[in-house]
Image (spheres, coloured by chain):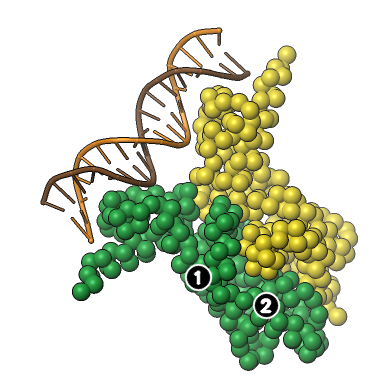
Chain colours: A green, B yellow, C orange, D brown
Amino acid sequence: MTNIKKDNTEEKILTAAQNVFVRKGMDGARMQEIADEAGINKALLHYYFRSKQQLFEAIFKSVFGKIMPNIMLMATSEKSIEEKLGAFIENYIDILMKNPFLPTFILKEIHRAPELLAGMIKGSGLQPELIIAMFKQEMDNGNIRKMDPRDLIINVLSLSIFPIAAKPLMSVVFFDTDQKNYNEFIERRKVTVKEFVLHSILIK
Amino acid sequence: MTNIKKDNTEEKILTAAQNVFVRKGMDGARMQEIADEAGINKALLHYYFRSKQQLFEAIFKSVFGKIMPNIMLMATSEKSIEEKLGAFIENYIDILMKNPFLPTFILKEIHRAPELLAGMIKGSGLQPELIIAMFKQEMDNGNIRKMDPRDLIINVLSLSIFPIAAKPLMSVVFFDTDQKNYNEFIERRKVTVKEFVLHSILIK
DNA sequence: GTCTATATGGCGATAGAC
DNA sequence: GTCTATCGCCATATAGAC
């Protein structure tokens, strides 16, 4: 009943649009390039999504929705603080290594169109209070030193995300444009970032 | 002799172009908008800079040149590691607070046109080896724990830059879109980032 | 649903008067 | 050096045949 062609094409469009938008951003992306990558023509893009703007918003919401909830996993686990942080950092770096354009894409677009954000955050069911409360509990229990939990969260995110967002720059400055070496460096950071954070917050 | 009009206009163009390019990026910027902000018309832009591309490159090199050398200041000081790190973090966060669009602008453009980078880095006289050597010395002296110096440098940069690049997102998630509160939070990070790093690397 | 052809507008760039 | 007017292209979007 539901026609196969439609579903197939819509999927192809979404995949192609995500690739192009994430690499080029809203301003740099071209409908023609998306059509080419999807193996169809421009007119069909407008048949499925009325405008470039609507196609972009569909992609942005989808991409954003896949990235954000991961943060919450930290709060809903019964493991030790060491294990929770380690698992989160490893998982997050892993996702970003496979999608190195993602961080910069999101950063750029939230500057370009900040209105999109507020509504999405509210609708996402994201509960940052839970993570804050979790870290606060660890501090009250004397497991980690007292500090603003928001600082701790943002520090972990910074250490995980920024080195991948700045890859083109860092690989030139510190690795003489050797992409492979830099990828290995990032891979090692799954361990070294965890150590760096734990050294900072654990009470010895 | 040297005509005043020219110098005045060129300055106005450069200021306007920097504002627009840094906010909108190469793809999103419009020559008309730059002309408006400079109080002139489009034709004059092309009279001073032959093309949008050339104007953009002038801006990018200028902006990049103002940001990068700061990193070197860490290496060429006789102060203690605590003071060097503290001064660098405070100075860097200060610059970025006044230019909150800068980090994302640079990140986006180095992804869009990575070729521009390599040449600029070489010509800039930037010597990352000096900073690496400085940290290595501190480790050999037993002042800070042993680790890859590049990790330490990139960690400090991450903690300083990312929270400002991600401001539109973080202020919504953790501060309920209250920009003023988030600015105060960043201001406090001049201290808390230093503490976070020192707790991690100092040998007690 | 999918295509070709075309309308429509906007943008970078240039011509030419002053 | 600065302006107005305009060219030519390219990108989004639509019309209409199949």
Amino acid type of the residue tagged 2 in the rendering = Glu
Q: Amino acid at mark 1?
A: Gly
- Frontmost residue, B179 versus B104: B179
Q: Is residue B83 left or right of residue B99?
A: right
Residues at circles 2 and 1 in contact by the CB criterion of under 8 Å: no
Q: Could you say which disc has been placed on residue A129 in the image?
A: 2
Residue A139, above or below A23: below
Of the two numbered discs 2 and 1 in the rendering, the one whose residue sits closer to the viewer:
2
Say which of B190 and B144 sits in front: B190
What's the residue at 55%, 54% (across, down)?
A113
Same subunit, labels 2 and 1: the answer reads yes
Q: Is residue A50 above or below residue A93?
A: above
> Dot 2: within a 10 Å radius of its alpha carbon, few (fewer than 14), some, or many (20 or more) residues?
some
Q: Is residue A194 left or right of residue A148?
A: left
Q: Residue at x 68, y 30 (%)?
A: B11
**Earlier-in-chain disc, 2 versus 1:** 1
Residue A128 is marked as: none
Can residue A108 be seen here? Answer: no
Quarter of the figure that contains the N terminus of chain A: bottom left
Which residue in the structure is indicated by mark 1?
A65
Under tag 1, what secondary structure?
helix
Q: Residue at x 79, y 87 (%)?
A: A140
Residue B60, image quadrant: top right
> In the image, residue B46 lies at what x, y percent?
53, 27
- Residue B164, percent across and down? 69, 59
**CA separation, marks 2 and 1?**
18 Å
Q: What residue occupies the far right of the structure in this picture?
A: B79
